[in-house]
Amino acid sequence: MSHDTNAKLIYMANQIATFFKSQPQDEAAQGVATHINKYWEPRMRRKLFQHIDSGGEGLSPLVLEAASKIKRPEAA
Amino acid sequence: MSLIHEIDYGTPASRSETMVTLTIDGREVTVPEGTSIMRAAMDAGIEVPKLCASDMMDAFGSCRLCLVEIKGRGGMPASCTTPVAPGLEVSTQTPRLKDVRRGVMELYISDHPLDCLTCAANGDCELQDMAGAVGLRDVRYGYEGDNHVKARNNGEINAKWLPKDESNPYFTYDPAKCIVCSRCVRACEEVQGTFALTIGGRGFDSRVSAGMAEDFMSSECVSCGACVQACPTATLTEKSVIEIGQPEHSVVTTCAYCGVGCSFKAEMRGEELVRMVPWKDGQANRGHSCVKGRFAYGYSNHGDRILNPMIREKISDPWREVTWDEAYAHVAAEFRRLQYQYGRDSVGGITSSRCTNEETYLVQKLVRAGFGNNNVDTCARVCHSPTGYGLGQAFGTSAGTQNFDSVEFTDVAVIIGANPTDGHPVFASRLKKRLREGAKLIVIDPRRTDIVRSPHIEASYHLPLQPGTNVAILTSLAHVIVTEGLANEAFIRERCDWSEYEDWAAFVAEPYHSPEATEAYTGVPADLVRGAARLYATGGNGAIYYGLGVTEHSQGSTTVMAIANLAMVTGNIGRPGVGVNPLRGQNNVQGSCDMGSFPHELPGYRHISDDATRETFEKLWGVQISNEPGLRIPNMLDAAVDGTFKGIYIQGEDILQSDPDTKHVAAGLAAMECVVVHDLFLNETANYAHVFLPGSTFLEKDGTFTNAERRINRVRKVMTPKNGYADWEVTQKLAQAMGLNWNYRHPSEIMDEIAATTPSFALVSYDYLDKMGSVQWPCNEQHPEGSPIMHVDGFVRGKGKFIRTEYVATDERTGPRFPLLLTTGRILSQYNVGAQTRRTDNVVWHAEDQLEIHPHDAEQRGIRDGDWIRLASRAGETTLRTLITDRVAPGVVYTTFHHPTTQANVITTDFSDWATNCPEYKVTAVQVMPSNGPSDWQQDYDEQARQSRRIAGKLEAAE
């Protein structure tokens, strides 16, 4: 795994999505969003949104689906 | 202050509820059926003379000193082996008994050296006491003739005499003083469960023998100290007592090693610690100990301890000693500068699972109230954070569900990813005792750990799974339970959400979860999985005990949920003998989590976004608390590499050695501008520090630790801090330097604040703990005496939640370049990163980390036992010596991480648990090949460490 922290963040988001993908479908996207809202510090979420806003390459579709439910942090 | 003398009732207590009344020496006594006459007498305050009896062990009846007479019965039965019966009339002192006892004592003394004045046990010798008690005035047999006492008889070599065995670093065995009472042998069997000792020979030739007539060090002895504690004479004696003399006062305190949290009497002479003796009233350990807590405290006055604060501008500079005030002012100025320059969120702190609850509480308070952010984390991140998440989801609280006493009611114990005989030895002894009584055992572990098969213990099932396949195995177990109709539906309907259960049951019943299907990648034969599932579901009280082999995986949290599912589907929750029991690693890892050390939680596991909780603290502290979660340790390091995290206050944790992917940790630390390390020693992390604040040991402060069973135990100060200040005082001074108005005069005031703000601690105070001994949280109006067992009448969250657990293989895969899987763990004599135990004589058991490798894998690579090998992963490489053993399966290798020179974490990757970022220590794809010695990295690291430990004006500090 690289020390590229952006790649790591994408990897972490996808890991979370992988877990919730196996959960009942109607809970999956909300599950991802709730998890990220509860445990991700704003600058991590900010980086995630920067990546989503620039196309979200490499992110699991479930993360993209959850994006609207993830709390967008205030600008730094 | 005086020495605490515990009453020895002679035989263990009876659990019977039927009461029996009898008369002893004219006094009426009522005791539970099954109680010995000896114990009944002691209950009434009558001490029958005894030598071979102790209430830590079953009655043995060999010393013939505890004889009594019973009206209407012939002879003189031994009171230790004779149970009470209704209406008995017992006499403990009659002319006949006096004569016989004196005769027995005379025989003992006729083969015992009379060097009482210079004997180490002088003042603490039961033989001497009994000679006094029976009125021995004369030994008519003389000391000539056959004996074990003298090296020579009339100039001839005495073959019966044996020299002192001083091979163990902590105690001596002097056969000349042995009275062959068998207490040591029985303690080794019954209390410790190692069976290292026996009585060799017969008749007058009988003597205690370690192993096959070996010295103690060469035998199977694990140096737990139970034999030394049991010995009534100076035959087995602590070397510290021989050197110092008998203690004059003692204080009950709590061990600072593992999460079992044993209570000890620190026996003192002035401020000198003479010895640590396990306290029988300790509710976690019940009078037992292991080699670490009992003996390995010498680090507290090791020459490596740093006693003065130090500062340096660059980490390449030598350290410069400064006053405490300079150090505080420097840190305060630096942190304020960093926050001004890089933003409020650019600094943070790490609380220590080694420190007290009160100290941990203060560090998180400093971060939240002083730094104004939530960038606080703790070493639980790298061990049991998935437990918190997984159990929180399933049950509504991260709490382990049982007390340790619960094991006495267990019928089937399941151990998953834990090695209790090494990691939690005192609990392991209690478990082994229960197993010898007939409880069954299932072990799920890649290695054949000692508990799988050891004297008088044999697991019914050992499932030697491939590292990383925990979820697959546990879901397969659930598959068998559900599809074979073994689910406890009555329990589930009453206690759990039925529709969630149905969803989950349908999920686990899918054919691809069957043991036959998962066998292909778990490597565990399907019939073993089926057998284990049936045993757990139908064998009576089933209790799951698990450790870091569960949590330290990419799917750590999922595995914890899978464990919770198993407990719920079989109804093994909410009563003694069952439950989900996380075996926690560090003395206060439970407490550090309880105290709000996580970046998303305030004390008592309340999320930072909860307005009411924040308000409680905001009112008290007079500050605004951020409602956003802060950074976790790995996130802090990532942010440091990104340039947005610049300063950190680390209390009592060595992240450079203990956290995964050393190179990444080093890069993160190197990118920070102010790293403050608060510790006993210049640890590995301190190589990257700019400020060093000397820490204090658990012997030097007051406080509390909370053990793995949620038990809040007092830590009591027995000596003045060598560095001048307890850790809580240092944090307070630091807070004051940053402008916070803190004025705690004693840790009890900190606990009062915790109790006032945290509902699960509402009734906890030092006075209450002194009164109760200890309590298990929640301890509040609803549970005034604490909560030994959780979820008794229902789950904390209401209905128990079944959660689907889909197995996802870790991305850390073996391949042609890295064909083996490395997993890591602990060994009995060493503790964690070894900072303490490496600075004690415990190194005689484990002087270096070794790589365990299967003979087949070794043969293929031309590696012999003890060879230097190179161990390489995608993250890095190191070298160490091999230990060839079939404890590990082919394809799996194993090592410990106790020694910084090995740097096992150079190898581990930064993959982590999906939910908590708990690192995946337990699975790393590696290659192993012969090598000539240390790798370039090890040499560079060594040199860098040496350079960074220089202190201006002092000789180079040697590790």
Image (cartoon, coloured by chain):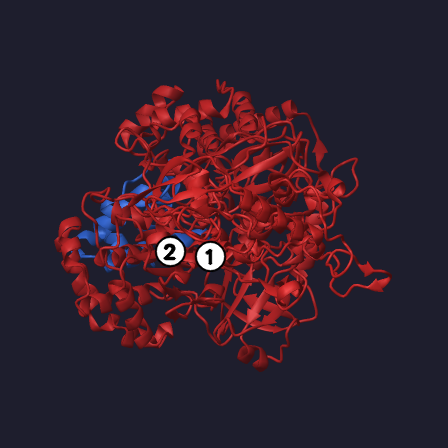
Q: Which colour denotes chain A?
A: blue
**Amino acid, disc 2:** Tyr
Picture coordinates of residue B494, whole percent (x, y) = 14, 50
Q: Closer to the camera, B202 or B511?
A: B202
Picture coordinates of residue B399, whole percent (x, y) = 34, 44
Helix or strand or loop: what does disc 1 sit on? helix
Neighbour tally class for label 1: few under 14, some 14-19, many 20 plus, Cα within 10 Å: many
Q: Which chain is red?
A: B
Chain letter of disc 1 in the image: B
Q: Which residue is mark 1?
A: B420
Q: Is residue B795 above or below residue B731?
A: below
**Amino acid, disc 1:** Pro
In terms of sequence position, does the residue under pointer 1 or pointer 2 come before the other? 1
Q: Closer to the camera, A27 or B847?
A: B847
Chain letter of disc 2 in the image: B
Quarter the N terminus of chain B occupies:
top right
Q: Which residue is mark 2?
A: B545
Residue at coordinates 21% horizontally, 51% vertically from top-left? B801
Whether residues under marks 1 and 2 lie with C-beta atoms below 8 angstroms apart, the answer is yes
Q: Closer to the camera, B817 or B701?
A: B701
